Image: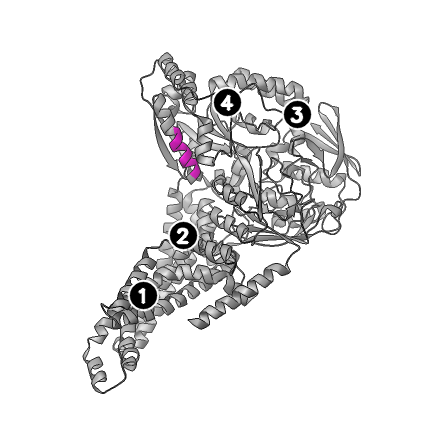
Amino acid sequence: MRRLLAAAMLVAVTALAMGSAAAQTLRIALREDADLLDPTLARTYVGRIVFAGLCDKLFDINEKLQIVPQLATGYEWTDPKTLLIHLRPGVVFQDGEKLDAAAVKFTLDRDLTMPGSFRRSEVSAIDHVEVVDPLTVRIVLKSPSGAFLAQLTDRAGMILPPKVTEQEGKNFALHPVCSGPFSFVERVPQDHITLQRFPQYWDAKDIHFDKVIYQVIVDSSARLANLQAGAVDLVEYILPTDAAAVKANPKLRLVVSDSLGYFGITNNLANGPRADNPYGKSALVRQAFSDAIDRSALVQVVYNGMYAPTMQAVPASSPFYDPGLKVPARDVAKAKALLAQAGVKTPVPLELMVPNNPDTMQAAEVIQSMAAEAGFDVHIRATEFAASLTLSEQGDYQSYAIGWSGRADIDGNIYAFLHSKQAQNVTGYANPAVDKLLDEARGLTDVAQRQKLYAQMWTQESQDLPITYLWIPRNIVGMTAKLQGFRPVPDGMIRLQGLEMAK
Amino acid sequence: MRGHLGTRIAQIIPTLLLVSVLVFCLQQLMPGDPALVMAGEERGDPQVLAQIRAELWLDRPVPVQYVHWLGNVLEGNLGYSWRIRQPVTQLIAEKLPVTLQLSAMAFVIAVLIGVPAGVIAAVQRNRFWDYVANAVGLAGLSTPTFWLGIMLILLVSVDLGWLPPSGYVPLMQDWRASLATTIMPAFVLGNSIAAILMRHTRSAMLTALDQDFVRTARAKGLREWIVIVRHALRNALIPVVTLGALELGTLLSGAVLTEQVFSIPGFGKLIVDAVFNRDYPVVQGVVLVTAALYVLLNLLADVLYVLINPRLRV
């Protein structure tokens, strides 16, 4: 036994020594494993975090959600349907190939035409792409689109080297090549992805690490413990309930920022027979339900007050946030009056489908008790996530607690869910006035004009309530206090430019 | 004996076929459309969904899908993961050794703790050390691995900083780092098995100590520890070994939770993630390989019985 203990100690000391030798490595803990490392075929949030190290994009977004150039140096709309993009000179891919207008055209065409492309819907506004000269691209759209530019700040804007990409075909994801600050080294599924510094990176002076390791740690307590023990330098997502532990630790730092997404209750208004009930048919009943919920108390109880209560689908930091649409205080008397006005018998039965993870379940229970006081009999139907998606598509639900990870432009957060002709509109909501406003706003590039239209749209939405918006989650990032230069951008990506470890 | 083994081997193929049919059918019963899961937040695009269904053969009848899959399996091809496009055989080849290492270490730890504790408890029957061993054993049995794992990480890694809190380094790459990353999870995993082994060793020892040959050994004037170790324990170990072999199978499946807590990329984590992501080829491949392993272990046990027990050779 004594020998065993001694052996354990020896092993521990070796492990510690190993830790200090790799000082120029940045270790980032991810909450789940990424999917395909191919920007055209990828679809997970954590995958985008890895891409932030691997692939540069034509444009990026900043802390204020403004679009800023990255691989581009600038852009201009020559007419409402024609976008001219000027490319940064002297950029090379990690395999040495030059990044030019032909590569941009190749990538966007690939997004549009590759079988299984997940980018198709994002770039479907494109009619065709023209190479003007090696550093200028002209993108001609089918119709004017205010949301299009924002698509190029994410995976659709990640430019790929034509030669390697053609050669590899569908196997590109196994050894991806891009133009980002770090190039791909290896991937052990469910364990880690390793990248190494790309010396010819165009912005190399802003890169201060030799290696980045993205470590998959699914369990939230284990993620926290790894950060506390110094085994990782940064955790991309700390649970709100673990935030206090990070704050209290002088060796660690917590950075909290608005995210792009939202969480709400999607209501079945006209998707199949399950909508035939007072809640589905009467806007008054849905308003009563919304009034019965104390959103501030809800996020206080479930998320330690770290999430922001909301009535709309974008965070307060978005240029399209409507300051006029405030979160109302809970009003049980008003809720009861609305139910009386709707002429329904109380208690109103309501089934709430909830993906069975602990925090959403807890939120559902709080909602259940709040709504009960106003005259609702909420039955919680805990459902595994994948199954709940299918049920919502089939219309086999009454109300569904579900979130959306969010897009840089407001259009990506609302159009697909509120417009009557969209496949992801599982509510069956069809309001011609809302459709018209959404279409009009989508076709404009002027922010102020779009703001006005969206404000009108919210006024109508908050009456009809196809979706009862509840809260805007926040990006809660934990890191060692020695890590400097972290920029909290609402998209939650870990930008490696400027990040460095204090000596 | 040959006939006996021949029958056993002939049973393997229909058993595996049955397992594969069952897995295929059970997957169809699972709620949730795999195409929707694969499409993620791009699920609003009907073209994307149609493309996924066509590519993964989801738009064809289940029997056709099964025959297609079986044909590939017979050629040694378990398909590729829908989620990350890696061959399933490669994933299994990467993950299985990890879980085998973890299970083997857990088993060694379980035996090192369980058997001596059981012997002490039996020898000290109804005395202080017996009660202590029983209490510790009961605690070991009733401690959830999830909780014990987190507590150990907090104590050993966060507070004391002795061992890395999670992750895995392959044995071939750096054996010391590999042991450092697996010793804690192996202890957590072996803990409950140790308790079971302790209880069984204790009762088997008690029976053995009551036997005539032990009285004879003592009457011959042998020293007490020789009586206990050489005479009683040897006989007591036979049922314990059988139990141990059974528990080794349990270890493979029990590793799921431990792998989750310690972020070890093993077999358990592979199948759990595959089920949640509706990555059917991975689920099918893993279940088939696991079933094959169980069948082979059973066959091995049969062979061992024959070798150990001469009466079976007739």
Whole-percent x, y for residue A416 in the image: 54, 27
Q: How far apart are marks 1 and 4 (CA)?
A: 60 Å
Residue A112 image label: none
| Badge 3: chain ID | A
Mark 1 packing: few (<14 Cα in 10 Å), some, or many (20+)? many
Residue under pointer 4 = A327
Residue A360 falls inside the magenta stretch: yes
Q: Are marks 2 and 1 in contact (CB under 8 Å)?
A: no
Sequence order check, earlier mark of 3 and 4:
3
| Badge 4 and badge 2 in a common chain | no
Secondary structure type for disc 4: loop
The range drawn in magenta is A359-367
Question: Which quarter of the image is occupied by the N terminus of chain A?
Answer: bottom left
Secondary structure type for disc 1: helix
Residue B197 image label: 1
| Badge 1 and badge 3 in a common chain | no
Q: Looking at the picture, which amino acid does disc 4 mark?
A: Val
| Badge 1: chain ID | B
Residue under pointer 3 = A145
Secondary structure type for disc 3: loop
- Compared with A325, B89 (above or below) is below
Residue under pointer 2 = B146
Q: Looking at the picture, which amino acid does disc 3 mark?
A: Ser
Residue A305 falls inside the magenta stretch: no
Sequence order check, earlier mark of 2 and 1:
2
